[in-house]
Amino acid sequence: MAIVAEYHFEHGTAYIDDSYIQSITPEQRQKNREAFEEVCWQVIRANERRRREAEEAAAAAGE
């Protein structure tokens, strides 16, 4: 097993190793990649939403 990618997020790090691709078809590999990308986008959107909510709360508290 070798780490082939690292993705750093605000609350953690995801490490991707090469073992998951050894025994799957190219089609399944693509589906896995798309599923992973969707999870990444969900994390990004959630972080953006929390940031906006914090900014709005700070603005409301300052008024």
Image (cartoon, grey):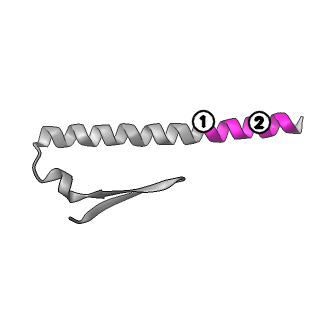
Comparing 26 with 2, the one in front is: 2
Q: Position of residue 16 (x, y in %)?
A: 30, 56
Residue 53 pos. (x, y %): 68, 35
**First to last magenta residue range:** 49-61
Q: Amino acid at mark 1?
A: Arg
Q: How many marks?
A: 2
User: Residue 36 bears which disc, if any?
Assistant: none
Q: CA distance from mark 1 to mark 2?
A: 12 Å
Judge left or right: residue 6 versus residue 9. Answer: left
Quick one: SS at disc 1? helix
Estimate how packed mark 2 is, as few (under 14), some (14 to 19) or many (20 or more) residues with alpha carbons within 10 Å.
Answer: few
Q: Residues within 10 Å of mark 1 (few under 14, many from 20)?
A: few
Q: Position of residue 54 (x, y in %)?
A: 71, 40
- Along the polypeptide, which appears first: circle 1 or circle 2? 1
**Can the viewer see residue 8 in this picture?**
no
**Which residue is denoted by mark 2 in the rendering?**
57
Amino acid at dot 2: Ala
Residue identifier under label 1: 49
Residue visible at 27% across and 43% down in the picture? 33
**Do tag 1 and tag 2 residues touch (Cβ < 8 Å)?**
no
Q: Residue at x 53, y 53 (%)?
A: 11
Split into 4 quadrants, where in the image is the N terminus? bottom left
State the image quarter where residue 37 is shown: top left
The quadrant where residue 60 appears:
top right
Q: Is residue 44 left or right of residue 63?
A: left
Q: Magenta-highlighted stretch: main secondary structure?
A: helix
Query: Would you say residue 34 is visible in this rendering?
Result: yes
Q: Which residue, as the protein is rendered here, is positioned at the far bottom?
A: 2
Secondary structure beneath label 2: helix
